[in-house]
Amino acid sequence: MAKRPEWLDNAVFYEIYPQSFADSNGDGTGDLPGITEKLSYIRELGCTAVWLNPCFESPFLDAGYDISDYCRIAPRYGTNEDMYELFRRAHELGMHVLLDLVPGHTSWEHPWFRESMKAEENEYTHRYVWTDSVWTEPQGYASLRGISQRDGSCVVNFFTHQPALNYGFFQPEQPWQQSMDSPGAIATREAMKDIMRFWLSKGCDGFRADMAGSLVKNDPDSEGTIALWQDIRSFLDEEFPDAALISEWGEPDKSLAGGFHMDFLLHFGPSHYNDLFRCEKPFFSGKGSAAEFVKKYRENYDRTDGKGLICIPSGNHDMDRLARSLHGDSLKLAFAFLLSMPGAPYIYYGDEIGMRYVENIPSVEGGYGRTGSRSPMQWDRTANAGFSSAPAEKLYIPLDPDPDRPTVSGQMADPHSLYSEVRRLIALRHATPALQSTGKIEFICDGSEGQPLVYTRSTASQKILVIINPTDRSFKYRASGDIIYSLGKVTSDRDGIEVPAVGAAFCNAE
Ligand code: NOJ
């Protein structure tokens, strides 16, 4: 288990999609000086760390997940100096900054790929996964074919314009499949370390690693990929022992074995995450069940020896906004859950005010259905919701057109708003060690249909009982103790604690 930087134990993250957060120069697209200016807002909400989606040079066919220069900030966001300034200001506010590391692929415009496409052998010939002839298709992988002088097909990692970097095959089976210790695979790994070294030495505090489990090919049990990350972890331990690493992997046992500090719970695959938030009958709407989620969560928790370092996000740039399927107090319940679970919680920008999914807008930069969750932050009721001074038609993504769209300024002024509830919950988490990342969790009721979700969080000296009741009936639980948080009119007497319909209570368990 990698040694964790202390700040992670009580970190509450805020994810910023840089295009859409704050536009300081009026060109319609968010930028780094805009983010720096708003860091105090994030700090005031109670978040102690931010994760920025990629802000590096890119042709932006996948909103920046198609990088063409890992060490240069894309001009539309500002300069490298602006990023250093963002680090500096965050540290001044006691915050930490994670950048998005995209180790699995580059843009097809990256100079490495341009060189790699050449027929003549050069330094980058083996930087990507190529077959030995254009007529050989890589079985089981999508590929780019017929676009290079080089006679070969190149494996892609995600969209067609994202060629896969070569970290080798765990079990090479074809002559063109290189092993993990081939010079080409080692050179790619070292290049990735150089990129990390570059940003960490400028003040970055760590990385969220994109598709972290995808690097080594033909690696059915991820043994090769785990070994690769372990090597990266030892480099970090030696040169940047405080650097935090969080993976987009969705298998915490593998990720933690690879040296990551925490792993994201994914919205796809077997996690049942969206049973809670986004499906026909989400648990927090009071109509669905949390039971399958709890079952999977427990399995993962047990597999990581109860370390439970699984990050549950409120949402992210790849999934529907929370407020697309949850409304009113159901949203508050969802946050009561998110902010009382182990692992670091992640709040996607705007979810704290219930920003909505913007329906029926054209795809922007490879967003497709994801575009509606990436609209500009709604700060106030001035032009463009205070996001930008550009003409409305120049905004990177159109705003939520509803004149009653929620805004930061409106919700900050209202003690009953979602924002105020989220702020209260974060403050409570900061003040209550058992609710933080490493406090142990034990489920008591698994939120089967019509039932609440009940669990305890504990440290050696503190035990908190959490009752979350999204159903339409009140629920009485046999327990006693001081109530430290309530949503709705919670009462307590000798027979127990009564939580109203669509209500929640946290109490000191005795
Ligand atoms: C996961 C990212 O979150 C997503 O936005 C991106 O399109 C893919 N990885 C490819 O990098």
Image: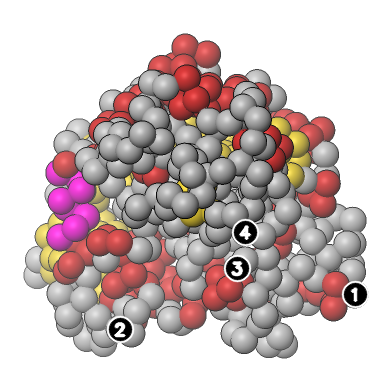
Query: Which residue in the protein does label 2 denote?
Result: 281
Task: Residue lying at the far top in this picture: please name it.
Answer: 238
Query: Which residue in the protein does label 4 denote?
Result: 62
Q: Is residue 235 visible?
A: yes
Q: Residue at x 62, y 59 (%)?
A: 62
Q: CA distance from mark 3 to mark 1?
A: 22 Å
Give neighbour class at mark 1: few <14, some 14-19, many 20+ (Cα, 10 Å): few
Identify the magenta region: 295-302
Residue type, numbered disc 2: Lys
Q: Is residue 296 magenta?
A: yes
Tag 2 or tag 1, which sits nearer the N-term? 2
Query: Secondary structure under badge 2?
Result: loop
Tag 4 or tag 2, which sits nearer the N-term? 4
Q: Where does residue 309 sit, x and y in percent of width and height?
A: 31, 41
Q: Residue at x 9, y 70 (%)?
A: 495
Query: Which residue in the protein does label 1 denote?
Result: 391
Residue type, numbered disc 3: Gly
Give whichever of 152, 359 is nearer the camera: 152
Residue type, numbered disc 1: Pro
Q: Residue at x 53, y 38 (%)?
A: 128
Give whichever of 355, 179 is nearer the camera: 179
Query: Secondary structure under badge 1?
Result: loop
Q: Which of the 4 image quadrants contains residue 391? A: bottom right
